[in-house]
Image (cartoon, rainbow, N blue to C red):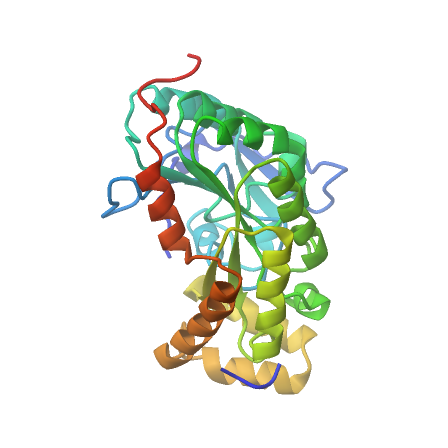
Amino acid sequence: MSETTAHQEGLFAAAEVTPVPPASPDFQDITFHEIQARTLLNRLPGAEPGGMGWTLNPYRGCTHACTYCFARDGHHHLGHNTGADFQAHLYVKTNAAAVLRRELRTGRTGDRWVMVGTSTDCYQRAEGRYQLMPGIIQALTDYRVPFTTTTKSALLRRDIPLYAEAARVTDVLVMTSLGSLDDRVWHAFEPDAAPPRARLDTIAALRAAGVPVGVLIAPVIPHAADHPDALNALVDACADAGAVTVFPDVMRLSPGARDWFLTQSARTLPPHLHQLLAADYTCRRAMPSRYIEEVTAHIHARAAHHGLPRWEDYVRHVSNRSNRGRTGPLRM
């Protein structure tokens, strides 16, 4: 650890994309492509009973503009570049809630969890306009399907009453993504996501409402956010806010993100930091396994100091203890 600071399966055919609407005056330079999805749930291969079995993403593209985002690869398959187009052309599955209800009605998810927002943030700014998440949460609640939501956005606070309702009848875990407390890191790598303090406040607000919250400590960016003291402070802040578990992940760069990431780092970072990142990532996707293991072990050790279990252990424990009568929906 430094002492200094995929292809995604298509859910809809290109021909099903509606004609490009004009840009909204509230979203300058952003174009929304409203689509009718045929399906919303994606099965995870090899899912174990009671484990994470499905993913669900109501948006493609993301206004957070995180320079490292692996989901950039998917924009290439939509006919866009994986740089500026990723945050300028957003695909919105406007029928998401209705499609999800149709799929849940079949019982296809079984006892496996649904992971919401695993590719692009389901609470990015576009959600303020389209408001897809309330219908999605309500469908999962009505069918008592265990689910997680992952976000960097404070907009999730709008739906805290819905998460609290869901947590009373099924297993819910909101994962806040936060890789650093340093505002310089936020500005450089996640320019339009919520600031770190706002994410911690969201954790506290959810916990006050009785909703379990974990933290995806990710990405840990080498040389910029991997100092042991910085990682300790981050884990401490998450624990103080009420997190129940953490999941650390060191930055990996997909092929579609690498060029954009390095171009932006050359433009925005101090030269020495850009040179370090370029040396590490120009010819490879991830840091050496020994480095990843060291960073991960350090975070887990600090989390254990606060009594926070590893994410996989937390989910396994919750799934094993929870037989809350998921035999049928609350409402059809």
Residue at point 45%, 26% (across, down): 169
- Residue 86 position, x and y percent, is 56, 52
Quarter of the picture containing the C terminus is top left
How many numbered marks appear?
0
Q: As rendered, which of 33 and 316 lies closer to the eye?
A: 316
Residue 177's image quarter?
bottom right
Residue 151 position (above or below residue 161): below
Residue at point 26%, 45% (across, down): 47
Residue at point 34%, 18% (across, down): 328
- Residue 138 position, x and y percent, is 51, 24
Residue at point 63%, 77% (across, down): 266
Residue 229 position (above or below residue 87): below
Q: As rendered, which of 186 and 166 lies closer to the eye?
A: 166
Residue 270 position (above or below residue 212): below
Any part of residue 95 in sight? no
Q: Residue lying furthest top in this view? A: 332
Q: Is residue 100 left or right of residue 65?
A: left
- Residue 173 position, x and y percent, is 48, 42
Residue 160's image quarter?
top right
Any part of residue 275 in sight? yes
- Residue 57 position, x and y percent, is 46, 40
Q: As rendered, which of 123 and 311 lies closer to the eye?
A: 311
Q: Is residue 208 left or right of residue 250?
A: right
